[in-house]
Amino acid sequence: MEKKPGLLLTVVTPEKTVLNEHPVDFVVLPAFGGELGVLPGHAPEVVQLKEGFLRYSSGKDKEVFSALSGFAEIYNNRVLVLAEAAELSKEIDEERAKQAWRKAKDAIAMQGDQIDIDEAQASLKRAAVRLKLAEYRKKHK
């Protein structure tokens, strides 16, 4: 008899639904107070997310996402992640992430009237998380 995973994970961004009620054993969220591990039976909670890694495991299937700000709702063995952006580690192009990081860094350094500093800082954070995740992927193959 096969054991059923105890959580259902949904990850949604403004562009798409990344995962929809995917059965998992546990989830680790990049919360503002530090990483938050979620197991079946977790107390109901709403958590603000920061940029970082969202990890989950379901048996032999383990996956890592880059997640950029948003919220997660934990309720009744369901985890709903509403993120500004989320990408699977295998979808990240390291060279493109390096170029985006350099471009955002240059835009912040210029600080001209044509630059939206908040957008440039968000781009820098997004690129930094992608680069960290690309490195993580290399180490954990």
Image (cartoon, grey):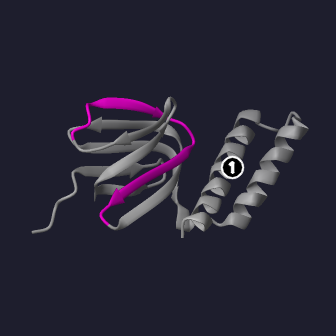
Is residue 118 positioned above or below 40 on the image? Answer: above
Q: Main secondary structure of the magenta part?
A: strand
Q: Amino acid at mark 1?
A: Ala
The quarter of the rendered structure image containing the C terminus is: bottom right
Q: Report whether 57 appears left or right of 34.
A: left
Q: Secondary structure at mark 1?
A: helix
- Tell whether 130 sits left or right of 77: right
Q: Seen from this angle, which residue lies furthest left?
A: 1
The residue shown at (50%, 55%) is 65
Rendered-image quadrant of the N terminus: bottom left
Q: Report the residue at 86% width, 46% height from top.
A: 106
Question: Is 67 rendered above or below residue 87?
Answer: above
Q: Position of residue 16 (x, y in %)?
A: 44, 55
| Residue 102, percent from left and from top | 81, 53
Horizontal side of residue 77 vs 9, given as left or right? left
Q: Position of residue 61 (x, y in %)?
A: 36, 66
Q: Which of the 4 image quarters holds residue 76? A: top left
Is residue 126 one of those drawn in magenta? no
Q: Depth check: 43 or 19 in front?
A: 43
Q: Is 50 a magenta residue?
A: yes
Give the magenta range: 41-59
Question: Residue at 68% across / 51% down in the picture?
Answer: 127
Left or right, 109 with reference to 78? right
Q: Percent from the top left, x then y, of residue 111?
A: 87, 35
Rendering quarter of residue 112: top right
What residue is pinned by disc 1?
128
Q: Give neighbour class at mark 1: few <14, some 14-19, many 20+ (Cα, 10 Å).
A: some
